[in-house]
Image (cartoon, rainbow, N blue to C red):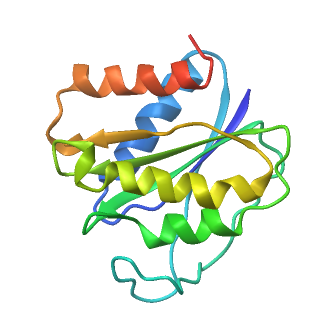
Amino acid sequence: MKAGIVYHSQTGTTRDFAEKVAAGMRARGHAVDVIVIEPEGEVRPHQSDVKLKRNPEYGGYDALLIGGPIWAFGMSPVAVAFADGLRDFPGKVILPFATMGAPVAIMGGIQGMAKMRRCLRKSGATVLKGVVGTGWARRTDAEKQAVVTRVLALLGIS
């Protein structure tokens, strides 16, 4: 499988998540590109008019993992902007993801995944349920690995 992990990170926590998932996929023989998305200018939580500095190409991937942090109980508006513009990805798989400081997904993670799935349905791809890395920065390496294993399982990678 050739996958692209497209993410927005404000503090580095989501970058850590993306890199750990990429390492897990690579260790199992899959090709993975990790792609940062950045906004033009400052962004506020829940902002709906975000413009990206550049919109990464995604046509050459079998799967995309798209995510960002939960801010103020909502999904990163930068990740949402990319997801909302995604089109023409039929027959492929998309897995949304989020990281958050709170220890439980009900504090914005569940809502963030629902918003991402709504945006991503326009792509024509199979959109998976998604994964929320709660309390990610405070997790042990073993706990982080368990989340990575869950991501891989959702993608059908053992």
**Which residue is drawn at the image coordinates 82% and 50% (left, top)?**
89
Total number of numbered labels? 0
Residue 149: % across, % down: 43, 19
Residue sitting nearer the eye, 132 or 138: 132
Residue that lies at the very extreme toward the top in this rendered image:
158
Residue 81: % across, % down: 57, 72
Residue 112 vertical position relative to residue 46 in the rendered view, above or below: above
Residue sitting nearer the eye, 10 or 98: 98
Which picture quadrant has residue 41?
bottom left
Is residue 58 visible in the rendered structure shown here?
no
Which picture quadrant has residue 71?
bottom left
Location of the N terminus by quadrant is top right
Q: Seen in the image, is 49 located left or right of residue 124?
A: left
Residue 102: % across, % down: 17, 50
Residue 32 vertical position relative to residue 50 in the rendered view, above or below: above
Which picture quadrant has residue 53?
bottom right
Q: Seen in the image, is 108 located left or right of residue 124?
A: left
Q: Seen in the image, is 44 located left or right of residue 97?
A: left
Is residue 140 visible in the rendered structure shown here?
yes
**Which residue is drawn at the image coordinates 70% and 69% (left, top)?**
85
Residue 61: % across, % down: 77, 42
Location of the C terminus by quadrant is top right
**Which residue is drawn at the image coordinates 29% and 28% (left, top)?**
144
**Which residue is drawn at the image coordinates 45% and 72% (left, top)?**
77
